Image (cartoon, grey):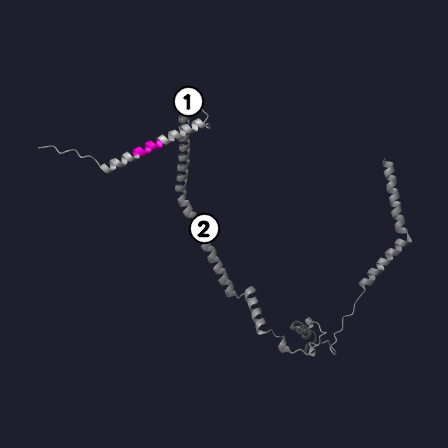
């Protein structure tokens, strides 16, 4: 296996050497070197600026493109040919509307130092007010924390007590149903639900009578004993 691999590598090396030593490869290499030398030695001549007969577009002609009739192109012509362009220098200045726009952009993106300092102070003042308001809110919430914890514990205790009372009442009702019917009754059965409704009706009636009795006693007032005869 090693011998066959050595033979293949030797054959590949021989093919590479033959390709390099062939006349076509030499010509190709020479042509590439010549192209590189020609490219490196290329020195183009600068374009000559025609100041004697410059191209000035006719703005009244319909053949002249619209972009050559703009003030921007006039500034370009004056910058290239100077007074030979025939452009009035007064027309190169921005109009009052353009000047106001430029001034507004400069004031927005490059405001004076006084304005920048004023903006920094206003931002710092706003950040300070926001921080103080947050600290005040945190302090108020921390002051309410003991009461909130106490209310939570109280609610949790009341819920636990209510569940305990509900469980005791349910067991009491099941025991009463067992005693009344002589067998264990399913809490979801019709008989058990009827019994619960009947008991609740009786309890409601008792509470109503007790409330009426207390109201009558409050209206009558305390009974004063008769005075002893002398």
Q: Which residue is mark 1?
A: 181
Which residue sits at x=49%, y=63%? Answer: 118
Q: Nearer the viewer, residue 141 or 116?
A: 141
Vertical relation: 21 (above or below) 34: above
- Among the two numbered marks 1 and 2 on one chain, the one whose residue lies closer to the N terminus: 2
Q: Is residue 103 left or right of residue 161?
A: right
Specify the farthest residue to the top: 182
Q: Quadrant of residue 48?
A: bottom right
Q: Image point 86% across, 39% down: which residue?
A: 6
**Does residue 54 appear left or right of residue 224 in this picture?**
right
Tell me the magenta residue range.
203-210
Between 56 and 22, the one nearer to me in the picture: 56
The image quarter in which residue 153 lies = top left
10 Å neighbourhood of mark 2: few (<14), some, or many (≥20)? few
Q: Nearer the viewer, mark 1 or mark 2?
A: 1
Mark carried by residue 208: none
Q: Give the main secondary structure of the magenta stretch.
A: helix
Image: 212 above or below 12: above
- Residue 111 placement, left or right of 225: right
Total labels: the figure holds 2
In the image, 226 versus 89, the foreground residue is 226
Q: Quadrant of the N terminus?
A: top right
Residue 173, how many percent across, how many down? 40, 26
Residue 27: horizontal and vertical position, in percent? 89, 56
Give the image location of residue 17, x and y in percent.
88, 48
Which quarter of the image is occupied by the C terminus?
A: top left
Q: Which residue is mark 2?
A: 134
What SS does tag 2 mark? Answer: helix
């Amino acid at each position: 296996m090693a011998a066959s691999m050595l033979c293949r590598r030797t054959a590949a090396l021989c093919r590479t050497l033959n390709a390099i030593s062939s006349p076509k490869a030499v010509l190709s290499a020479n042509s590439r070197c010549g192209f590189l030398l020609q490219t490196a030695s290329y020195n183009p001549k600068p374009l000559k600026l025609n100041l004697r007969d410059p191209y000035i577009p006719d703005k009244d002609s319909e053949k002249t493109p619209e972009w050559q009739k703009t003030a921007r192109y006039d500034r370009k012509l004056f910058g290239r040919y100077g007074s030979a362009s025939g452009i009035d220098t007064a027309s190169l200045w921005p109009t009052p509307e353009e000047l106001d726009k430029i001034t507004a952009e400069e004031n927005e993106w490059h405001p004076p130092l006084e304005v920048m300092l004023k903006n920094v102070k206003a931002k710092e003042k706003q950040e300070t007010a926001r921080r103080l308001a947050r600290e005040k809110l945190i302090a108020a919430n921390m002051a309410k924390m003991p009461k909130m914890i106490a209310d939570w514990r109280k609610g949790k205790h009341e819920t636990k007590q209510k569940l305990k009372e509900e469980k005791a009442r349910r067991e009491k009702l099941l025991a009463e149903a067992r005693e009344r019917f002589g067998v264990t009754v399913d809490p979801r059965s019709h008989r058990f639900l009827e019994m619960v409704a009947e008991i609740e009706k009786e309890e409601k009636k008792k509470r109503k009578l007790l409330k009426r009795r207390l109201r009558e006693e409050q209206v009558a007032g305390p009974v004063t004993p008769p005075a002893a005869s002398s």
